[in-house]
Amino acid sequence: MYQQLATSFAAMSNLPATLRARLEEETELQVLSVGQREHSAATGTVKLLFSLQDGQAVEGVLMRYRKWYSACISSQAGCRMGCRFCASTLTGLARNLTQAEMVDQVLALEREAREAGGRVRSIVLMGTGEPLDNYGAVLGFLRLVTSPESLDLSYRHISLSTCGLVPGIRRLAREGLPLTLSVSLHAPTDELRSQLMPVNKLYPIRELLLAWREYTERTGRRVTFEYALIAGINDSLREAHALAALLKGQLAHVNLIPLNEVAEREFKRPRPQQVTAFALVLRKQGIPTTVRRELGADISAACGQLRHRVFTRVSRRRGEL
Ligand code: SAH
């Protein structure tokens, strides 16, 4: 299953026929199927829309970095965090994904990678859903994919992104796993962050930074702060300076994401000059800053947009919208 990527017990010809028959009867090998596939020839990015057994759908994306691949997977069908700029949360949370559904996404993306002559070496939990809102299944998933008898991936090559669920971050810190944690910050002040991300009303920036410090102290790992740049909302140089002041002298790295525009949302992406100017302010203050490379804009690989598009189409057909 993990090494040969078998998709049926029948294909496991090294097992006795009676065992194969019994396995087929008592269990199942795949809990999701590939419903739709989009491929960007320019970047090698592949986006898969997975159909789950109860009719739900989630997205997974394979991204190429030189010779190796990164698998971006979903942790929930939908999301209940309500971030104003995000497509994944438009219709709320349908349900948590199981550990098996997360592993199956990785295996399907690994199949794609092997067909292209590569391997999945890293995983990012940055698809649909808030991973720390599905804590148990996500931890089970991480333990499984890092175990030598399955995919044997290194925790150092796994990134978990959270909108800032403070109790989850503290709990994760205590697990002591050398994961890369990404925190979606998106604003340097509580006033602005609460407008963009309702979760900030529950866990304001000060608490988030304390949890983040606990995480870096316990794990020794640097935390990445994600900052989606939205034109006229959070992309001014004033915000850049405020962000620099907030993070200065800490074990932090900022990843700027020029907004992926979502049809249902009014927000716009800033001009490239603004992104460069924002990054420059941070770098001048000594904060390591990167700008996210774009790998999927041509195939709606960004942030829950494919799932949303397909779901909207299906609901329209059913006359629900
Ligand atoms: N729930 C987790 C993981 C989700 S998505 C989290 O909030 O971190 C991964 C990143 O994409 C997050 O930083 C999220 O805020 C960001 N994102 C969501 N919608 C976006 C959009 N339209 N444009 C750019 N980034 C977006």
Image (tube, helix red, strand yellow):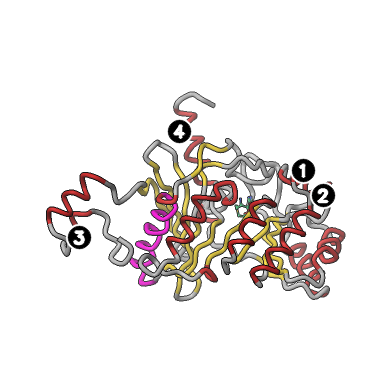
Q: What residue type is labelled 2?
A: Asp
Q: Mark 2 points at which residue?
A: 190
Dot placed on the residue nearer the N-terminal end, 3 or 1: 3
Q: The residue tagged with tag 1: helix, strand or loop? A: helix
**Looking at the image, is mark 2 or mark 3 nearer the viewer?**
3
Between 235 and 30, the residue placed more toward the observer is 30
SS assignment for the magenta stretch, majority: helix
Q: How far apart are marks 3 and 4 (CA)?
A: 37 Å
Taking the view exactly as shown, the residue that stands out farthest to the top is 319
Residue 150: image location, x then y, percent: 37, 65
Dot placed on the residue nearer the N-terminal end, 2 or 1: 2
Residue 167: image location, x then y, percent: 67, 51
Quick one: quadrant of the N terminus?
bottom left
Q: Name the residue under label 4.
A: 314
Q: Mark 3 points at which residue?
A: 12
Quick one: quadrant of the C terminus?
top right
Does residue 52 lie above or below 4 as drawn? above
